[in-house]
Amino acid sequence: MEHTQEDGAVEETNMAAWLSGIKKLQIRPYHLPPLGPNDVKVQIKALGICGSDVHHFKNMRVANFIVKKPMVIGHECAGIIKDVGSSVKSLAVGDRVALEPGISCNTCNLCKNGTYNLCPKMKFFGSPPTNGSLANQVVHPANLVYKLPDNVSLEEGAMCEPLSVAVHACRRADVTPDTKVLIFGAGPIGLLTMLAARTFGSPKIIVADVDDSRLSFAKHLGADAIIQVSTNIQDIDEEVAKIHKLMGDGVDISFDCVGFNKTMSTALTATRSGGKVCLVGLGPSPMTIPLVPAAAREVDVIGIFRYRNTWPICIELLRTGKIDVKPLITHRYKFTQEDVEKAFETSAQGGDAIKVMFNL
C-alpha cells in the first residue's frame, strides 16, 4: 500500500502485524507517532518470535499483562535507520542497528538507581498496551538503538534481545570460572543462558529438559551433560541423584528457564548448600515449592525481569564470536499475512523450532 504526501512524493503505508484476538493476527496499517528530536525511525529488517509473543498469541495475556485492545506484536528486532531526529548525533540514516525494546520513565527512584528494567511506567514493545515492532517501520528513542558492527548480521542483532535475558541472568547470579551450572529448559532462553554462562567462564554446564530432541540440540551447542527429566513431581529425588552424579560435585547455580513447580522444586533440591537458584522463566503463579528446606541450607533465590545495560556487551560477544547465536535460528518467514500466521503457529508448536525469525 502507498499514499501521496503533500509534496507529491509517494510513500509506502507502514504496515504491522496486529493481534486482535486469540490466534488472530492481521497485517494492516500502523500510523507511527511523529519523530521527536531524540528519536530515530527504523525500518525493521529482522524480528524474532519470543515465548511471550506466543503467550499473547495463544492466550491474549502473559501473567498480569493482558491484551485488551488490538496491539502490534513483537519486540526482538533489528533494522536500518531511515530518519533521525534533529538532536540525534550518534546515529545516521543507513546505519544497521539493534533496538532495546523498553522505554523507562528515567525519573522514578528505580530508574535513577540504575534498575530501569523494573520501572513501573515501562513502555515495552509488544507488551500491552504498548504496540510492538513487527512492522515495516517504528519510531524509537535513539539512546535505545545500538549500531551493529559490519560482521554482525541483522538477524544476530535481533537476537541481542533474548541474549540480553541470558546475560542479565548470569550477571545477577554472578557466574564465574569456578561456577558449576545447571539449566532447566532447552528452549531459546535456556540455550542462550548456557552459551552466556560458558562465556562468563562456567567450567561445567548440565542442561535438563523433557524433550529429547532439544537436549540433543543443547549437547550439540556445547552442554557438558544433558538429562531428560519428567513432569512428575514424584521423580525429583531420583533426578537430583542423577544430576549430582553427572556433575560429580555440587551444583553452584541453577537457572530455571521454565518456571514450573517441578523445575523450581528440582532446582532448589539439586543446588548445593550456599548456592543460588535463579528463576528466569515466568510460568504459572503462585508456585508450591520446598522453600523452607532450601532456606535452611542458605540457598539463595534470585529473580530477574528482562535486563538492563546489556546491549553493548551482547553486541561485543557477537562481534568477537565468543557467542554464536546463528544455530538457534531454525525457521525463517517473510512479512506476509500467510507467513505471519504460519510463523506463529510454528513457534507455538515448539518441537524442532527454536527461534523463528521474520525477514522483512
Image (cartoon, rainbow, N blue to C red):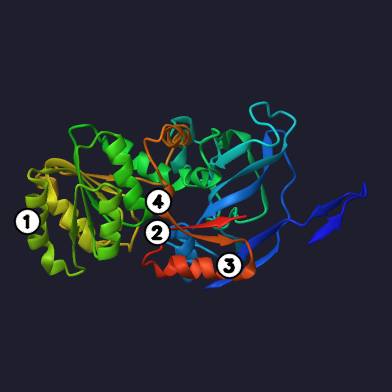
- The amino acid sitting under disc 3 is Asp
Does residue 152 show up?
A: yes
Q: Earlier in the sequence, mark 3 or mark 1?
A: 1
Q: Earlier in the sequence, mark 3 or mark 4?
A: 4
- The amino acid sitting under disc 1 is Ala
Residue under label 1, please give it. Answer: 241
Callout 2 crowding tier (Cα within 10 Å): few <14, some 14–19, many ≥20: many
> Where in the figure is residue 319, as x and y percent of width and height?
46, 33
Q: Nearer the viewer, mark 3 or mark 1?
A: 3
* Displayed quadrant of residue 42: top right
Q: Residue at x 38, y 54 (%)?
A: 188
As measured in the structure, the alpha-carbon distance from the residue carrying label 3 to the one carrying label 2 is: 17 Å
Q: Nearer the viewer, mark 1 or mark 4?
A: 4
Identify the disc placed on residue 327.
4
> Where in the figure is residue 172, as x and y percent of width and height?
31, 38
As measured in the structure, the alpha-carbon distance from the residue carrying label 3 to the one carrying label 4 is: 21 Å
